Amino acid sequence: MSDATIDKLKDRFDAEAASGMQEVFQFHFNDAGDYYLVVDDGTLEVHEGEHDDPSVSLSMSSDTLKGVMSGEINGMTAFMTGKLKATGNVMLATQLSHLFPGH
């Protein structure tokens, strides 16, 4: 995962959509390492590594994440076809496109 992709996440973050939300999204990228996003009532922090107790853990390639974020890949389709694996509160994964809407 390049810093540019992380920066795009920060740029696209919709604080209003995250109002009242307190969740940790763990990402395991098979081509780019581990990152987690801490969403806390309209704020976003991005960290490298693994969180002790994430709300949801998502495993995928960084390209799959880019596709889901851009809307080119349907998250449920990615999940059903095995491109995306999720554990924990899987329904949170469906919130990603709302939290990081495309421009």
Image: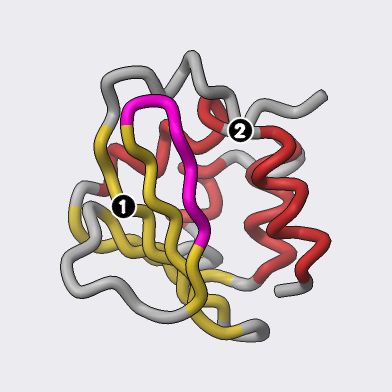
Stretch in magenta: 41-46
Residue 61 x, y percent position in the rendering: 63, 72
Snapshot colouring: secondary structure
Task: Give whichever of discs 1 and 2 has the lower sequence position.
Answer: 2
What residue is drawn where x is 46% and y is 18%?
Answer: 17
Mark 2 crowd level (few <14, some 14–19, many ≥20, 10 Å Cα): many
Residue extending farthest top? 16
Q: Is residue 19 left or right of residue 96?
A: left
Q: Is residue 16 above or below residue 14?
A: above
Q: Is residue 67 left or right of residue 78?
A: right
Q: Which residue is mark 2?
A: 13
Nearer to the camera, 57 or 19:
19
Q: Which residue is mark 1?
A: 24
What residue is drawn where x is 54% and y is 70%?
Answer: 60
- Dividing the picture into quarters, in which one does residue 6 lie? bottom right
Nearer to the camera, 97 or 54:
54
